[in-house]
């Protein structure tokens, strides 16, 4: 399931209303950094707005509105506002759970995890510990 959302900003510049937007798939960014990218520069680039212009500054003064969300991200868009922190946490948790489920299935142990629900929590904790250890080692 892809996580796609449209990010748009409405602002006025020299008395003219602008509504630049960008439809973005979040998964590549989440996979590479675990975070949603800063969207203002991406919206500006997509809409031919110079990053060193007053127009860009005016755009940055307004909040980004989110719409047409698909996938997990849709659960975190309410009234045009994306709870970025909650989405990033949920996306990373989902990634961990999916990875663990694949390992469990590969080893034919799905029935064991189903029989012992706390085992899944234990595996998630072990995964996170390994991830932190790997990150610390590779600093």
Image: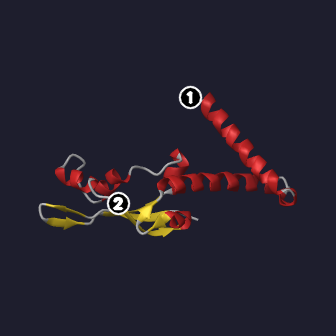
Please give left or right for residue 56 compared with residue 36 in the image: left
85 horizontally vs 97: left or right: left
Residue most toward the front? 79
Task: Give the class, few, some or many, for how many residues have Cα within 10 Å of label 2's Cα (few <14, many ≥20).
Answer: some
Give the mark nearest the N terminus, 1 or 2: 2
Most foreground residue, 9 or 86: 86
Nearer the observer, 91 or 4: 91
Q: Which mark is residue 139?
A: 1
| Residue at 45% across, 61% down | 82
Label 2 residue SS: loop
Q: Secondary structure at mark 1?
A: loop
Above-or-below relation of 79 to 59: below
Q: Residues within 10 Å of mark 1 (few under 14, many from 20)?
A: few
Viewed as shown, does residue 40 lie left or right of 95? left
Q: Which one is in front, 8 or 80? A: 80
Q: Position of residue 80 (x, y in %)?
A: 40, 67
Residue 109 location (% of width, % of height): 85, 55
């Amino acid at each position: 399931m892809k996580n796609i959302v449209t990010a748009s900003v409405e602002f006025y510049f020299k008395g003219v209303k602008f509504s630049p937007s960008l439809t973005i798939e979040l998964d590549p960014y989440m996979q590479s950094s675990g975070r949603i990218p800063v969207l203002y520069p991406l919206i500006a680039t997509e809409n031919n707005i110079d990053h060193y212009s007053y127009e860009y500054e005016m755009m940055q003064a307004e909040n980004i509105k989110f719409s047409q969300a698909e996938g997990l991200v849709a659960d975190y868009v309410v009234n045009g506002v994306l709870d970025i922190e909650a989405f990033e946490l949920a996306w990373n948790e989902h990634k961990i759970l999916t990875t663990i489920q694949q390992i469990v299935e590969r080893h034919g142990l799905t029935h064991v995890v189903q029989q012992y629900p706390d085992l899944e929590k234990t595996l998630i904790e072990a995964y996170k510990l390994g991830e932190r250890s790997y990150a610390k080692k590779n600093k």
